[in-house]
Image: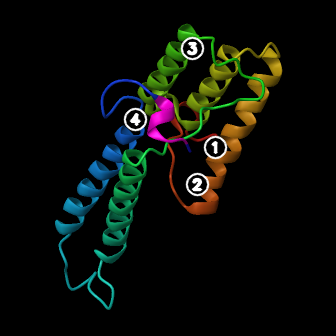
Amino acid sequence: MTTPSSRGGPGLLHGRSELGVAALLGALAVIVAVDTANIRQTAVNSGVMGPQVVPAIIATGLALCAIALAISVLRGGHADPEEGEDIDLSIPAHWPTVFGLAGLILGYALVLDPLGYVVASSILFYGSALLLGSRRFVWALLIGVALSVATFYGFVLGLGIPLPAGLLTGIL
């Protein structure tokens, strides 16, 4: 933590980007509190602790964190800059990779139902591995399929949560 005088710069808010995080936490606290207030209490869900208790605790915790962070930042505290071991922070982001991953995630959302969880997740893993620099094409595909099948059966058999089978309906 440093003092405000050691950071320098004009204006009260200069170098205090952590206030944005505090504002985000405050906004989340308000959203959770409003949603909590709108929970209807019925005979089915009423009891010693109704359905509003846990969300109210979460909203209160978010609000307290937002207030504490804002006070800390306004008093001069701030987080230390990131010091990655193998990361050169002076190099900007590689935007083709970022947009490629975003496109893969968007495509995943669009093809999840028609192709099914296993096929769509395998494609997502394989494409992500290639975009992030993997040159082991067969291994990336095999690992993606294995993880997708294991996750599918973990959800369907282990948790009882149905996932779309898509093209593999009747096979899985």
> With respect to residue 53, does 122 lie above or below?
above
Does dot 3 land on a helix, a strand or a loop? loop
How far is mark 2 from mark 1, CA to CA?
10 Å
Looking at the image, is mark 3 or mark 4 earlier in the sequence?
4
The residue positioned 17% from the left and 72% from the top of the image is: 40
Q: Circle 2 sits on which residue?
A: 156
Whether the residues at callouts 3 and 2 have beta carbons within 8 Å, the answer is no
Q: Between marks 3 and 4, how big is the CA–CA gap?
A: 23 Å
Of badges 2 and 4, nearer the viewer stands 4
Query: Mark 2 against mark 1, which lies toward the viewer?
Result: 2
The one nearer the camera, 169 or 92, is 92
Q: Which mark is residue 29?
A: none
Q: Is residue 15 above or below residue 69?
A: above
Tell me the residue that label 4 is attached to. Answer: 16
Quadrant the N terminus occupies: top right
Question: In the image, what residue type sits under mark 1?
Answer: Leu
How far, Cα to Cα, is label 3 from label 2?
38 Å
Q: Is residue 5 magenta?
A: yes
Q: Find out whether the residues at labels 3 and 1 contact each other: C-beta distance under 8 Å.
A: no
In the image, residue 78 lies at what x, y percent? Answer: 50, 42
* Name of the residue lying farthest toward the bottom: 48
How many marks the image carries: the answer is 4
The part of the image, by quadrant, that contains residue 35 is bottom left
Residue under label 1, please give it.
172
- Label 1 element class: loop
Q: Where residue 150 sits in the image (x, y, percent)? A: 71, 46
Cβ atoms at labels 2 and 1 below 8 Å apart = yes
Which stretch is magenta? 2-7
Residue visible at 58% across and 62% down in the picture: 159
Which circle, 3 or 2, is nearer the viewer?
A: 3
Of the two numbered discs 2 and 1 on the same chain, state the one appearing first in sequence: 2
